Amino acid sequence: MSRKIAKLTWLNNGNYGSVLQALALQKYLVNNGYDVTDLDYNASLKTKLLNWLVNKNSPKLFLGKYKEAKRKREYKDSKKFDVRSKRFAEFKKKNMKISGVCKNPAEIKKEAEKYDIFICGSDQIWSPALMNPVFYFSFLQESKSKIAYAPSFGVMDTTQEKKNKISKYLKGFDYISVREPQGKDIVKEITGKDVPVVIDPTLLIGKNDWKKYTGKRIIKDNYIFCYLLTPNPIYIKAVKKFAESKKLKVVIVPTSKGPFDTGFKEMVDAGPQEWLNLIQNAECVCTDSFHGCIFSSIFNKEFILFKRFQDTDKKSENSRVYNLVKLLQEEDRLIDEKNIDSIYELKEINFDKINQIVMREAEKSGKWLLDALDNVMGRK
């Protein structure tokens, strides 16, 4: 008799990469014969406030959410953000097996009684800045089998107090893997364990799998796709100039932060399917997004990856893009404000090479996960 697997990651932050990595890991496990459900943890405001206080997270988290909601309301056509949210919900409902909504640790603990094995990951669910014990399965009994596949800490270091908490939670896992070498170092420091670095779940399934989620081509003309998580006037100007040199229009999906009024074709209402479609059919992708770069690689699209943070920024998340371009052997594709003109000197990407790299790493990472599952099942 097959055992039921519950998977836990971020599903409700309105981020394309978050939802698509959740879908990918579920799809990969289903393809390998497992019965998998994603736990829909969407904490209430009261629960979020309590978690924030207990774990001493930054007040900027709530300030950021407030500003995001305000920007959406003030956008010239705010209903398009409502359409985007609706499309996210429809995409998840159509393509994933998801539990009922759990709004606090007590509710997810009750929901967990239906399952035998638990997998958390990927994304920055283990970020100390967003510390939440739920994503370390703090609500589970010690006897439950727990596996971590590719969670990210998102930072190079954190406070000793948070390290002590994380160390306690990690002791309950049967198997741990992480997404970046920096995460491996953190786990080694606080637990003494050597854990493997595995690839992002979106790379566990191939281009043909992803094509099933893209729909019919949206933009008929040839275009450059632009997706920036952090608006940067220097990057916007560079994309505009680059597009003019190629005689191409630019299509952009702004976040709640913008950028708006760039002169590009704005698609604020794009859901995950539309976002994938825009990458799949672009001539080139200009982005500062980790997953924007990943999907450009999956669909074999030329890409320019802008560095989102200054390396001196204590909250920099650049480590994950450094690791990604190193994996793909395309370090020259990572562009910052200082070498912006080098985008005109880039050689065409050798996608045959990239496809081979990804296939090799996907096989290795997938084997680790399937072996971990076999082992915990064998002990039952």
Image (cartoon, helix red, strand yellow):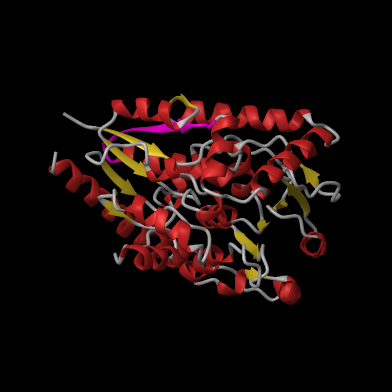
Locate residue 232, reporting x and y percent: 77, 59
- Check the image and name the residue furthest to the left: 379
Q: Residue at x 54, y 69 (%)?
A: 322
- Check the image and name the residue furthest to the top: 100
Q: Is residue 98 visible?
A: no
State yes or no: residue 271 in magenta.
Answer: no
Q: Residue at x 51, y 55 (%)?
A: 128
Locate residue 35, reporting x and y percent: 29, 32
Q: Is residue 258 left or right of residue 335?
A: right
Locate residue 240, reporting x and y percent: 81, 59
Of 250 and 143, nearer the camera is 143
Q: Is residue 42 left or right of residue 32?
A: right
Quadrant where the N terminus sits is: top left
Please tell me whether residue 378 is drawn above or below residue 332 in the rendered image: above
Locate residue 75, reporting x and y percent: 83, 36
Please tell me whether residue 97 is drawn above or below residue 160 in the rendered image: above
State yes or no: residue 42 in magenta.
Answer: yes
Q: Residue at x 57, y 35 (%)?
A: 215
Q: Is residue 68 left or right of residue 104?
A: right
User: What range of the chain is rendered magenta?
Assistant: 32-43
Please tell me whether residue 310 is drawn above or below residue 107 in the rendered image: below
Quadrant where the C terminus sits is: top left
Q: Residue at x 25, y 39 (%)?
A: 144
Of 134 and 202, nearer the camera is 134
Count of number-bearing discs: 0
Q: Is residue 294 visible?
A: yes
Please tell me whether residue 302 is drawn above or below residue 83 in the rendered image: below
